[in-house]
C-alpha cells in the first residue's frame, strides 16, 4: 500500500491526541502573514524560505538544542493574533481525524513579545479553541506548560491557581518542559505539590527525552506525574519500566519528534514497541506538527511501517490515550464509545 493511501486511512481513524504544543502547531501561512505584518527579522519572501527557519528540514542537525531554535515567540501582538492561532490549530487537528485534543501551551511564551496579561492569554486561547472544537464536533482540553529554565515559584503559583480556577473553561492539567539536563525534577517539587493539591489538574512531565531513566522515576515519585512526555530513557532501567506499568503512568510518545531531535537514531529501534510489550501504557502523539512538517497521522504511519502495528495495535494505544486523558469519567466513556465505533467502521478499509 502506498504511503498516501495509508495516511488517508489513518486520517479516518478517531484519534486522541494528548501531546501537542500550540507553539509548534502554527500554520505556515499564518506565520508568514503575521511575520510580514510585524516586520519580523525572518525570511518572509515566501512560504518555502520561511519554512527553512521555522520548521525542521532534512539534513539539518538532529539535536534538541537545534530543534528549539525553530520556535519563535514574536508572532503575536494582540489577543486577536492569539485567538487566531488557537482556533486554527484546533481546526487543523480535527482535519487530521483527532476527536479529542489536549492542547498545551505556555502562557509566558505568548506574553513574551506581546506583553499581554497571562490570564487574558489563557482566556483567549481557551475561548477560541473551544469555539473551533465545537464547530468541528471534537472536544478539547488545555494543559499549561512551564519551561524549566524560567522557574519562578511565586509567578508559577499564581498561574497554577489561575489554571485551577479555569477548570470550567477547559484547563485540565499542567506540564513541565524545557532543559532537563540543567534543571532536573527535584527543583520543581514544591510547585508540583501545589499542582497535585489543586485536585482538579492532571500532571504531565517531559522526562527522559534525552536524559536518564532516573528523570522518569523522579517525575513520577517526586512530581506526581500521571503522564510522561516522551520517557524514552525508561527502557534503560527495568525498575522504572515496572514502576510505569504498575502505576499505569502513560507515556506520550512522539516518534517523528524523537527522530528529528536526535533522541532516537533509528525509527525501527524506537522504544515504544518494547515498552508496549512490557505492559507500559504508551500512546502516539505529535508534539510540534508544523515544525516537524507532519501530522499525527505521520506518527501513526511510523507505527504501521516501522513496527508492523496493525489496527488492533493502534486501537490498543488509542484506548490507552482515552484512559489517560484528563477527563471526568462520563466524558471518558463517551470518548471510548466514539473511538471504538470509529475503529469498527474503519475495519474494512484495507489496513489490517
Ligand atoms: Zn513536547
Image: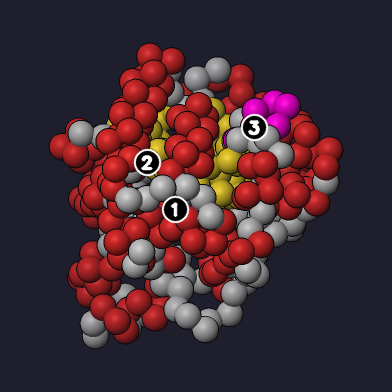
Q: Is mark 2 within 8 Å of ligand 1?
A: no
Q: Which residue is mark 3?
A: 249
| Span shown in magenta | 245-250
350 sits left or right of 145 in the view? left
Give the x, y percent position of residue 19: 47, 45
Q: Secondary structure at mark 3?
A: loop
What secondary structure is found at the residue carrying circle 2? Answer: strand
**Height in image: 54 above or below 344?**
below
Q: Earlier in the sequence, mark 3 or mark 1?
A: 3
Residue 327 in the image: state x and y as whole percent: 43, 23
Residue 300's tag is: 1
State the residue position of label 2. 15
Residue appearing at x 15%, y 37% in the figure: 135
Mark 1 and mark 2: span between their CA atoms?
10 Å
Vertical relation: 240 (above or below) 39: above
- Residue 279 magenta-highlighted: no
Q: Is residue 67 visible?
A: yes
Q: Which residue appears at 25% of the width and 72% of the height?
A: 32
Amino acid at each position: 500500500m502506498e504511503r498516501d493511501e495509508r495516511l488517508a486511512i489513518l486520517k479516518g481513524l478517531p484519534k486522541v491526541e494528548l501531546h501537542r504544543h500550540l507553539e509548534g502547531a502554527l500554520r505556515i501561512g499564518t506565520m508568514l502573514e503575521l511575520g510580514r505584518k510585524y516586520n519580523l527579522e525572518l525570511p518572509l519572501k515566501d512560504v518555502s524560505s520561511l519554512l527553512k527557519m521555522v520548521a525542521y528540514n532534512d539534513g539539518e542537525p538532529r539535536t534538541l538544542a537545534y530543534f528549539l531554535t525553530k520556535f519563535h515567540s514574536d508572532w503575536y501582538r494582540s489577543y486577536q493574533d492569539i485567538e487566531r492561532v488557537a482556533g486554527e490549530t484546533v481546526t487543523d487537528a480535527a482535519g487530521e481525524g483527532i476527536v479529542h485534543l489536549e492542547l498545551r501551551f505556555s502562557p509566558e511564551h505568548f506574553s513574551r513579545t506581546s506583553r499581554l496579561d497571562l490570564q487574558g492569554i489563557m482566556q483567549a486561547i481557551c475561548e477560541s479553541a473551544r469555539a473551533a472544537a465545537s464547530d468541528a464536533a471534537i472536544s478539547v482540553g488545555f494543559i499549561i506548560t512551564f519551561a524549566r529554565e524560567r522557574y519562578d515559584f511565586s509567578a508559577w503559583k499564581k498561574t497554577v491557581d489561575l489554571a485551577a480556577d479555569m477548570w470550567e473553561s477547559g484547563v485540565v492539567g499542567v506540564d513541565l518542559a524545557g532543559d532537563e539536563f540543567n534543571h532536573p525534577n527535584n527543583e520543581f517539587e514544591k510547585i508540583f505539590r501545589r499542582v497535585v493539591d489543586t485536585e482538579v489538574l492532571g500532571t504531565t512531565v517531559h522526562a527522559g527525552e534525552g536524559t536518564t531513566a532516573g528523570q522518569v522515576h523522579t517525575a513520577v515519585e517526586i512530581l506526581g506525574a500521571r503522564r510522561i512526555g516522551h520517557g524514552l530513557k525508561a527502557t534503560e532501567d527495568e525498575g522504572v519500566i515496572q514502576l510505569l506499568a504498575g502505576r499505569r503512568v502513560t507515556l506520550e510518545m512522539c516518534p517523528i519528534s524523537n527522530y528529528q531531535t536526535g533522541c532516537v537514531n533509528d525509527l525501527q529501534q524506537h522504544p515504544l514497541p518494547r515498552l508496549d510489550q512490557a505492559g507500559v501504557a504508551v500512546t502516539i502523539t505529535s508534539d510540534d506538527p508544523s515544525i516537524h512538517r507532519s501530522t499525527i497521522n505521520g506518527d501513526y504511519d511510523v507505527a504501521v511501517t516501522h513496527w508492523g502495528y496493525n489496527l488492533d495495535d493502534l486501537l490498543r494505544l488509542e484506548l490507552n490515550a482515552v484512559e489517560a486523558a484528563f477527563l471526568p469519567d462520563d466524558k471518558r466513556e463517551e470518548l471510548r464509545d466514539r473511538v471504538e465505533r470509529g475503529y469498527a467502521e474503519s475495519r474494512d478499509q484495507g489496513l489490517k
